[in-house]
């Protein structure tokens, strides 16, 4: 399977390591032979139609901070040029989520789809701003569009709701979809101030480069948009979410909740409305997970409420979700 990998940060590098360590059993068990024919990062690119060497990609990135020096002749081909000029079967889009205009991920995805390539995105920006039209574009061009890693990282939240609960009618859901704010709120529960908890989360590398994405609820809202479209069949985008972050939560609020045997959590919910905001959750509720964990409770018409808990981020975890998507695509192609 020929792959163009857009973005080569923590997730992209984890994916290449995963391919490298699993290459034999991926082929033996699933007939999957991933061949990366092009990679680009913010400084340059590496291209080889016969397949780039996984170890060399990791080595060059570590040594020079870019894949540009993979070959003797520096390659400065942009992601768009690569997508237009290199033949590949799948685009894996891992550039940073941007909720203003979704670029450059949006152009990568639309260019690939128009060229007949299947797309796997862990970039939430394009889905948050244009989910309904991207799905239409994929259908129009008869390509598969997969995005398991956008919600819950390696925890298969979307797959659970869409496939394990097939035939059911999910009536509502509510979840903790942002690990960073959960970590901050959990630590505030132990008596630490908001500022100290934020600093600790930053020191541990949890907070996004643009902290507003976590603290103002945008990341959770983007995930809510994806869930609402994919699981509930709504046609919504980011402006449809009523979104409040955690900046105004004080130690007093946390103490007050604690007296009610509850904790304050940033909850993304879909009932009648789509809301992201801080909410008191009983400490006895399975949803009330701590640290960087994510959790989501789906309530359906006949099977009651089930809560899924797992890690919502991490390079290898997210890479494992990309692998799942790739295997689905491989299986679909084989079936055809
Ligand atoms: N900033 C996100 C979080 C990363 O804290 O959950 C995963 O999308």
Image: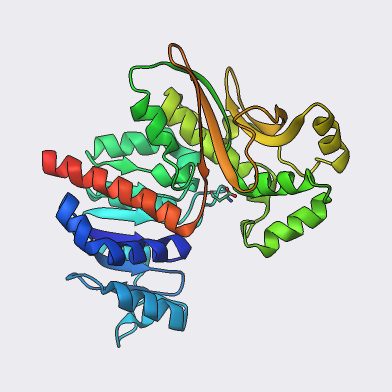
The residue at the far top in this view is: 302
The residue at the far right in this view is: 252
User: Could you tell me residue 12's position as x and y percent?
Assistant: 40, 62
Do we see residue 119 in this rendering? no
In what quadrant of the picture does the N terminus appear?
A: bottom left
Q: Residue at x 24, y 50 (%)?
A: 117
Do we see residue 192 in this rendering? yes
- Relative placement, left or right, of 126 versus 92 is right
Q: Residue at x 82, y 51 (%)?
A: 192
The residue at the far bottom in this view is: 72
In what quadrant of the picture does the C terminus appear?
A: top left
User: Could you tell me residue 28's position as x and y percent?
Assistant: 15, 56
Q: Reply above or below: 193 against 130.
A: below
The picture quadrant where one finds residue 80 is bottom left
- Relative placement, left or right, of 2 versus 82 is left
The picture quadrant where one finds residue 247 is top right
Q: Reply above or below: 39 against 117.
A: below
Along the line of sight, which residue is nearer the eye, 156 or 141?
Answer: 156
User: Could you tell me residue 21's position as x and y percent?
Assistant: 30, 65
- Relative placement, left or right, of 178 versus 323 is right
Q: Residue at x 62, y 43 (%)?
A: 218
Q: Reply above or below: 192 against 240.
A: below
The picture quadrant where one finds residue 286 is top right
């Amino acid at each position: 399977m020929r792959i163009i990998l857009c973005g080569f940060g923590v997730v992209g590098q984890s994916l290449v390591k995963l391919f490298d360590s699993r290459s034999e059993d991926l082929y033996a068990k699933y007939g999957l032979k991933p061949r990366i024919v092009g990679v680009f990062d913010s400084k340059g690119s590496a291209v080889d139609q016969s397949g780039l060497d996984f170890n060399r990609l990791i080595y060059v990135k570590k040594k020079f901070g870019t894949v540009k020096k993979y070959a003797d002749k520096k390659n400065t081909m942009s992601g768009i040029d690569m997508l237009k000029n290199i033949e590949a079967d799948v685009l894996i889009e891992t550039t940073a989520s941007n909720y203003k205009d979704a670029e450059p991920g949006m152009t990568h995805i639309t260019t690939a789809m128009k060229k007949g390539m299947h797309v796997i995105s862990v970039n939430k920006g394009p889905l948050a701003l244009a989910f309904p039209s991207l799905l239409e574009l994929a259908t129009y061009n008869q390509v598969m569009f997969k995005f398991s890693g956008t919600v819950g990282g390696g925890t298969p939240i979307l797959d659970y709701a869409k496939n394990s609960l097939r035939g059911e009618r999910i009536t509502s859901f509510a979840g903790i979809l942002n690990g960073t704010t959960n970590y901050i709120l959990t630590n505030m529960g132990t008596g630490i101030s908001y500022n100290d908890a934020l600093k600790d989360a930053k020191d541990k590398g949890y907070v996004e480069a643009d902290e507003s994405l976590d603290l103002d609820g945008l990341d959770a809202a983007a995930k809510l948009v994806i869930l609402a479209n994919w699981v509930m069949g709504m046609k919504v985008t980011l402006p449809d979410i009523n979104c409040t972050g955690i900046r105004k939560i004080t130690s007093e609020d946390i103490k007050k909740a604690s007296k009610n045997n509850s904790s304050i959590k940033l909850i993304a919910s879909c009932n009648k409305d789509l809301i992201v905001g801080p909410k008191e959750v009983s400490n006895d509720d399975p949803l009330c997970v701590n640290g960087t964990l994510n959790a989501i409770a789906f309530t359906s018409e006949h099977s009651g409420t089930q809560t899924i808990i797992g890690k919502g981020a991490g390079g290898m975890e997210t890479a494992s979700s990309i692998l799942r998507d790739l295997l689905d695509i491989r299986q679909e192609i084989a079936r055809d």
